[in-house]
């Protein structure tokens, strides 16, 4: 793993948690279909001026490679937005990390080195920490919201593998532009049905979410082709730590003793992965 890669991973995690926080505080009057369309539409518009100068012309083969990934991103974004509005940000973030096991198990088939024994220990330990952290709040969480977070985790693991393959041959800006455009196309029909005008505060909020989404996608395309998926999956567990901070600061979420112990276990697994694998 390159020296700068962990920095990029932390930056992407911060963007993702900020997106989750902004989605949580977004108006309940905006449908998840319209919000998803505007999220990727604003991302596309932000990138468009740069694409003409920095990126080559888009080819049909690019669309064919990106279309399945963009469809999964749309499904994952809908599920994630619903989960964020239904359950605590920290709990939703924790449930998302069932994808860590999937990434580790599938790494050998996705063009990445299979997890070493140390990495498997770190993955298992990290997921155990997640289970310990979320178990008290999971008992009272609405089933549809928890199921939506798990669906987002499942699709996210497949998206990660596709990101690795696409990022190996395409520049991050161009790859992010195509992703945003295709995701908008998938989101448009349902967004049009549920459309309503936005006020100024909502426009600013959507633009901020779009900007963070753009940065997050570009960082993923930069990091994934250059790093092993098992190690990324372990470090990725750090999102729950950032989500916990966001939940405490913005939503006054309570932090239980088991949550603190779980976070410490996750932190230990991340440190061990970086230090020994």
Image (cartoon, rainbow, N blue to C red):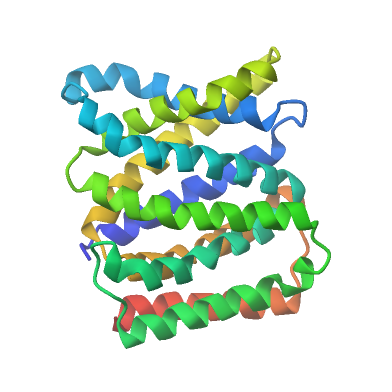
Query: Which residue is more in the foreground, 148 or 14?
Result: 148
Q: Is residue 115 above or below residue 43?
A: below
- Please tell me in which quadrant of the rendered image residue 142 appears: bottom right
- Please tell me in which quadrant of the rendered image residue 6 appears: bottom left
Q: Is residue 191 above or below residue 78?
A: above
Q: Residue at x 54, y 64 (%)?
A: 97
Give x and y (percent) for residue 31: 70, 28
Query: Which residue is more in the foreground, 144 or 29?
Result: 144
Q: How many marks?
A: 0
Q: Residue at x 54, y 27 (%)?
A: 187
Q: Residue at x 77, y 67 (%)?
A: 137
Question: In the displayed structure, does residue 245 sit left or right of residue 236?
Answer: right
Q: Give the position of the N terminus as an image quadrant.
A: bottom left
Q: Tell me, yes or no, if residue 85 can be seen here.
A: yes
Q: Is residue 104 above or below residue 162?
A: below
Query: Which residue is more in the foreground, 209 or 56?
Result: 56
Q: Tell me, yes or no, if residue 247 can be seen here.
A: no
Q: Is residue 223 above or below residue 277?
A: above
Give x and y (percent) for residue 70: 42, 37
Q: Residue furthest right?
A: 140
Question: In the displayed structure, does residue 165 sit left or right of residue 97?
Answer: left
Q: Residue at x 47, y 25 (%)?
A: 184
Question: In the displayed structure, does residue 237 sit left or right of residue 198?
Answer: left
- Please tell me in which quadrant of the rendered image residue 180 appears: top left
Question: In the displayed structure, does residue 158 sit left or right of residue 29?
Answer: left
Query: Which residue is more in the foreground, 71 or 222?
Result: 71
Q: Give the position of the C terminus as an image quadrant.
A: bottom left
Give x and y (percent) for residue 161: 34, 55
Give x and y (percent) for residue 148: 66, 51
């Amino acid at each position: 793993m390159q020296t700068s890669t962990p920095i990029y991973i932390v930056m992407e995690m911060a963007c993702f948690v900020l997106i989750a926080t902004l989605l949580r505080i977004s108006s309940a009057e905006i449908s998840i279909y319209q919000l998803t369309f505007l999220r990727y539409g604003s991302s596309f518009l932000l990138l468009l001026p740069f694409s003409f100068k920095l990126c080559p012309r888009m080819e049909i083969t690019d669309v064919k490679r990106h279309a399945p990934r963009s469809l999964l991103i749309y499904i994952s974004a809908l599920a994630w937005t619903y989960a964020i509005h239904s359950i605590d940000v920290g709990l939703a973030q924790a449930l998302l990390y069932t994808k860590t096991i999937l990434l580790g198990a599938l790494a050998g088939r996705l063009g990445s080195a299979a997890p070493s024994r140390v990495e498997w220990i770190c993955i298992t330990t990290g997921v155990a920490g997640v289970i310990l952290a979320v178990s008290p709040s999971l008992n009272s969480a609405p089933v549809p919201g928890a199921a939506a977070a798990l669906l987002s985790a499942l699709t996210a693991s497949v998206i990660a593998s596709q990101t690795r393959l696409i990022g190996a041959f395409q520049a991050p800006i161009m790859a992010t532009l195509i992703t945003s455009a295709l995701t908008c196309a998938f989101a448009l029909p349902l967004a049009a049905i549920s459309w309503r005008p936005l006020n100024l505060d909502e426009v600013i909020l959507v633009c901020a979410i779009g900007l963070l989404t753009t940065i997050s996608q570009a960082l993923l395309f930069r990091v994934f082709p250059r790093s092993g998926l098992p190690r990324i999956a372990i470090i990725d567990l750090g999102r729950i730590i950032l989500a916990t901070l966001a939940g405490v600061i913005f939503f006054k979420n309570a932090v239980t003793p088991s949550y603190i112990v779980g976070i410490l276990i996750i932190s230990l697994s991340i440190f061990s992965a970086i230090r020994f694998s």
